[in-house]
Structure formats: C-alpha cells, structure tokens
Image (tube, rainbow, N blue to C red):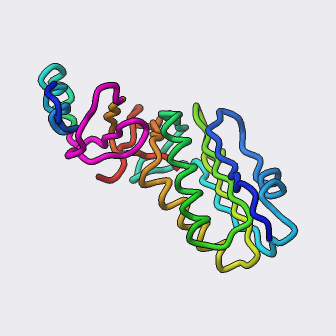
Amino acid sequence: MEDGSTVGDALLLIKEHYPVLANQGYSPMTACNLKHVSKRHALEDGDELAIFPPVSGG
Amino acid sequence: MHMTEKSNIILITPDPIDVTELMSRVRRSTSGALASFVGVVRDHHEGRSVHHLEYQAYPPMAEREMARIAGDARERWALDGVAVIHRTGRLEVGEASVAIVVAAPHRKEAFEACSFIIEELKRSVPIWKKEFGETGEAWVIGPV
C-alpha cells in the first residue's frame, strides 16, 4: 500500500480479496498495535492491524 | 504517603475465578470498601435458551485494554487496588465469566469505579462470546 494509507484503505483492500468480509452486516472494529484506532488512522510499515467484530465480552 | 508503582491485577485465564482471593489481594489497610462485579453465564439471551458459552480473546490487546481501563479508573477515583479478570474457553450456565474487584477507602468511589470498569470492558476489550443453545451455535456480535 502507498505511504499514508489509512486503516479504511486497508479494509477496502482486504474486502476485495475476501468478499465474505464485505457482507457481514456489521461495521468491524479496528486496532493498530494493540490499540483501538479509527478508520482514518494512518498506517506505517511494521504496524499490526487487527480487524474484528464488535466485541461481546463480559 | 509514598506512592510505589500501582500494580493492578489484570488477567485473562481459562481457570475458574476466585473472587474472595482477589478481594484479599486488592485490599490495603486503608481500604474501608471492597466492591465487586461478577458476570455470570445465564440460561437465556434474547428469548432463546442458552446451554453454554465459549469465550475467545485477542489476548495481548485484551490485557492491554483491561490494564488501560483499570488505570483510567485509578486516575478518576481514589482507589487502593483494582482486579479485572476475564475467563476464556467453555463456560456453563452459572459460571463466572468476568470479575471486577475494587478496593478503596470509601464505598462511593469503590462502587462508581467498579461500575465504570465493567461498562468500559464491555465496550472495548477484544473478547467475544459464542452462544450454544436450542437454535444452534452463533457468535454474539456486540452493539455497533
């Protein structure tokens, strides 16, 4: 991905490769390096991006 | 009063939770109040009967979020100690999935902090439950 790509950009790219993720019926939560981030968060080399359904712990 | 590093008890574990043990660990001689919340697997959800649950975590982030929330609580209220424990794996109806224990000099802070912590945990800690019941099995998706 290009420099300055955001979490949202990564999500779009991932959904292109895994269409099943585009039809889940919920908006995923996103985390970068173990912290919640918005879709506007800019990614850097080496970042660990996590995409997951809205949490249901407790 | 000399403040040493505030260490909270933060744990994700497959083992049963011992609330009494947590109370004795968070308590200090300055604590006049111990408040706790225990989340327990119940036998129904949205009108369906539930047989058991399975919990799964994203462990490094889950522990980090639990520690962050505990730290936030200690910033907001005068507390002596905090424990936040969440179980993973298969849990039967009646088993405790999560426990929050807060020690404080006074009960107002203990109650408020305890409530804050469980609400924040349910909003942001990356743990999910899968429900097994009469209609089959399905992951529970949290509120968007």
What's drawn in magenta, residue-wise?
Answer: A25-47
Give the image location of residue A57, x and y in percent.
49, 46
Q: Quadrant of residue B134?
A: top left
Q: Position of residue A2 (x, y in %)?
A: 14, 27
Is residue B27 highlighted in magenta? no
Q: Residue furthest top?
A: A17
Q: Nearer the viewer, residue B15 or B48?
A: B15
Considering the image in quadrants, where does the N terminus of chain A appear? top left
Give the main secondary structure of the magenta stretch: loop
**Which residue appears farthest toward the right when viewing the image?**
B29
- Residue A17, position as x, y percentages in the image: 15, 19
Q: Is residue B142 left or right of residue B88?
A: left
Q: Is residue B89 left or right of residue B19?
A: left
Q: Which of B64 and B12 lies nearest the eye of the viewer? A: B64
Q: Quadrant of residue B109?
A: bottom right
Q: Which residue is pictured at 53% across the width and 34% down the height?
A: B59
Q: Tell me, yes or no, whether the highlighted magenta stretch contains residue A39.
A: yes
Horizontal side of A33 relative to B40 (left or right) equals left
Residue B78 drawn above or below residue A37: below
Query: Which residue corresponds to the image point at 33% horizontal and 53% vertical from the top-left?
Result: B143
How many numbered discs, if any?
0
Residue drawn 54% across the image and 59% down it: B118
The answer to whether residue B143 is seen in the rendering is: yes
**Residue B94 appears anywhere in the view:** no
Front in this rendered view, residue B54 or B128: B128
- Residue drawn at the location 83% of the way across and 72% of the way down: B30
